[in-house]
Structure formats: C-alpha cells, structure tokens
Image (cartoon, rainbow, N blue to C red):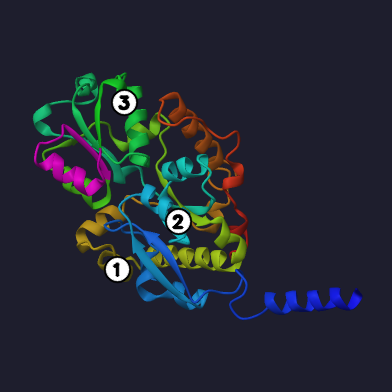
Amino acid sequence: MKRTIAAILATALATAFAPGATAAEKPEAITVAYFPEWPTANQVAQAERWYDEEMGLEVKWRPFDSGVQMADAMVAGEVDISYSMGIIPFMRAVSGGAPLTTVGIAVSYAENDNCVVHYKAAIDKANAHELEGKKIAVPFGTVTHYKLLRTLDFLAVDTGKLDLVDMVSVKGAEALARGEVTMACGWGGALRRMLGKNRVLMSAREQTKIGIRTFDVVAVTNDFAEAHPDLVTAFLRVSDRAADYLDDHPDEAGPVIAEAAGLSLKESNILLSRFQFYTRDAQLTGTWMRGGVQAFTREVADFYVEQGAMPEALDDYGPMFDAGFYERVR
C-alpha cells in the first residue's frame, strides 16, 4: 500500500512539474485589451515594448470599442488584462458573477467623457426636460451611460421617456453629425468630433460637483492573477514607469502616444492634458484602491438598481478589488 501511494505521489509530482502542465507556468504571450483613439501614458511602454521586456514574454494588444466588450472577452478567456476598462462595465460584470479583479486605476478623465447636444435642438441644462421623447446615442453599460443617467436624474429629466439607442462612441458621433440623434454621448476622439457648433449638456466640472467620478480601471481575470501574480505586479510597475516618463519627457512621449492611439499629435495632446494618471503612492490611498473605489462602486451599483438598469447589487464589492499587487510594486 505504501509503495502504491508513493508511486501515485511520484506520478502526480512528475505530472505537476512537467513542461506545460501547470497553469502557473509562465506563458509565452498574454493579451491586453485597450481602446483606440484613447491616448494613455502607458502607450509609450506599449510602443517601446517595455512590458514585453519587463514581463519576459510577448504582449499582444487587442483594441475594443467599449469596456463591455472587454469584459465579455475576458470572461471568454480571450483577454488576460484590460487597461482602461470603465468602472461601470467592471461593476456590471462582477455583479453578474464574472471572475474579474481590479488591481489599479488606469486613468481619471472627467473632461474626456460627456454628452453633446446637437446645436439645432437648442437644449441645455436649463431646459433639459425637452430631451424627453428625443433619440439619444449612448454606449450601454459604460461609464458614459452612468454619467448620462446621473446627470439627467439631477436635472429632473424622466429617463423613462427617453429614446436611448445603444451606440459606441464612434457611431454616436457619426449619428450626431448626420442629425439622426438629438444628443450623443462618448469619449476620446469621438467626443472631440461631437463638439464644434454642438455643446455639452453639463460640464465635467459641474458633474464632478454633484458627485460623478469618471475613471477606468486595470482589470485582470482571476485565473491570471492567481496563476501569475508577479506578472500582474510587473505590468503595474511598467505602467507607473510610463506615467513618470510622460511627466518628465512630454515632448518625447507625446508623438509616441499619438501614433499608438491613432490620433494627430495635437488631438492626442489635448486629450492627454485632460487625463490624470496615478502611480503607486496615489493608488494606495483611501481615495482610490484603499476604500474609495470600493465604496463608489457600491454607490453606482445601487443607483443602477434604483434606475432599473440592473436587477441587484452585491452586498460587498471589496473582494473585487486587490491593492496587494500595487503594494508589491517597487
């Protein structure tokens, strides 16, 4: 019996440590999701392959039009890390049981996400109720969608009387330009194209004053985080290095980021000037990864349930956030 048990254990150990046999073995490549036309500091590292060098593997970058698509791809096992997934898509995904964890804040960007009214409609915050019955383009389940609902709730607009159309930012900008919608909501380069003669319904500064926060997260699949914690920490370390490089060398970083984002240098720099990138010390504060984000996520979830946009919220979103990876960044 002892010999049989020993043989079984030996076989199990041999199998466990055989090449390619364990999930913890370092992969040859990983896939990271990102947004096109969304210039971020870490795109210096993306373009210069700092991630590949630091992590010792190939990083494949896959573009997505929305955080909802990112979350779906992660659940499907097609993406390991999402850089700049909106907090709303993350919240909705984990509320539905998606095995994802936020390990950091990618970017804060109140000025780079908003809703724009067609100038011919002559609607602003003073007569916002006139949006009732009108067609509005917005990417459902995103930070933009949440900001729209919160803004209209504050302006006493009956959201039940709106004709909301699910459109990603790029399509929304096109629909607004053709006059097919009265208002369109979006971010980044698409938001820039929505402006011109058109105007935002409510400024980002005004939205911030009523408690609307706008930020994206660095999300990882639980399987990847559990199997490769050192790689997650390395990813955050490189992201911080890129943020510091942008601060210290904006003239050198700017053109690299613009090219990676698919934007002109002028447009990219305008968007970058409205972004805030937080490194380790800022991340590990009560405002962000040590309590602030968790509380905000619960607040947002409760609001979605109240609006009938989600069946129920979790009792506690704390387990879906892990500051431990950033704590190990040195």
Marks 1 and 3 sit apart, C-alpha to C-alpha, by: 40 Å
Q: Secondary structure at mark 1?
A: helix
Which circle's residue, 1 or 2, is located before the other in the chain? 2
Residue 173 among those drawn in magenta: yes
Q: Decide: marks 3, 2 in contact (CB < 8 A)?
A: no
Write the residue at 37% across / 41% down. 143
Please name the residue that numbered disc 2 is placed on: 76
Magenta region includes residue 187: no
Between 206 and 294, the one lying in front of the other is 294
Label 2, residues with CA under 10 Å away: few <14, some 14-19, many ≥20: few
Image quarter hosting the C terminus: bottom right
In the image, residue 101 lies at what x, y percent? 54, 51
Q: Amino acid at mark 2?
A: Ala
Q: Badge 3: few (under 14), some or many (20 or more) residues near its Cα, within 10 Å? A: some
- Identify the residue under disc 3: 152
Q: Badge 1 is on which residue?
A: 251
Locate residue 13: give its quadrant: bottom right
Considering only vertical position in the picture, is 79 above or below 294? below
Work out whether mark 3 precedes mark 2 in sequence or the reverse, and give the earlier one. 2
Q: Position of residue 113 (x, y in %)?
A: 30, 43
- Disc 1 + disc 3, Cβ < 8 Å: no
Q: Residue furthest right?
A: 2
Q: Amino acid at mark 3?
A: Leu
Residue 15 falls in image quadrant: bottom right
Start and end of the magenta stretch? 166-186
